[in-house]
Image (spheres, grey):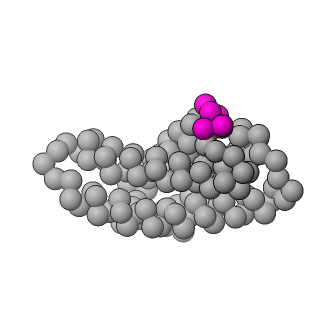
Amino acid sequence: MVVWLLGKLLFYGAMATLAIAMLRLYLKNPFGFVLLYTFVRFLLGVFAGLLIWYAWEKLHGIGEVERYALSFGAFRYVEWVAVLALIALHQRTSIWEMRWRGQFWVLIGVAGNILLDRIAIWTGLTNVRFYC
């Protein structure tokens, strides 16, 4: 579980680093930005994990793939859009001005999160898949 959690933190840090170049951010302290947004994304993930768990438990009567997409996929997308909105606010712009780069960054984040969630499930860590 510790390795999985470190993997998540490393991924969030990599996504914050990618955001600097991909979203063409102007920062005085890039290292501080990476640390801050790694921490923010982690906290958002913990909170959203509780919502994902609740949605997962309530979505019965549909297939496993649909249940996964509605709970994990939708919430992960909202999480990454929220982080993009915070970055846009920090840059004093809007997510609309980040155009395709912003959406592509969000989709990379969602795909990475889902991959890490699937790795947790494949390795038997099913009790942690809802968090972060």
Where does the image place residue 91, in percent across and percent down from the top left?
73, 51
Residue found at the far top of this picture: 100
Q: Residue at x 16, y 53 (%)?
A: 60
Query: In the rendered view, does 86 fall on the left or right side of 65?
Result: right
Q: Residue at x 46, y 50 (%)?
A: 78
For the residue pair 19 and 116, the one nearer the viewer reads as: 19
The reply to whether the magenta stretch includes residue 99 is yes
Residue 130 in which image quadrant? bottom left
Query: In the rendered view, does 26 fall on the left or right side of 129?
Result: right
Q: Which residues are magenta?
A: 96-101
For the residue pair 37 and 7, the one nearer the viewer reads as: 37
- For the image, the number of numbered tags is 0
Where does the image place residue 61, in percent across and percent down from the top left?
13, 48
Residue found at the far right of this picture: 28
Q: Main secondary structure of the magenta part?
A: helix
The reply to whether the magenta stretch includes residue 127 is no
Where does the image place residue 127, in percent across and percent down from the top left?
36, 66
Q: Residue at x 50, y 49 (%)?
A: 113
For the residue pair 99 and 42, the one nearer the viewer reads as: 99
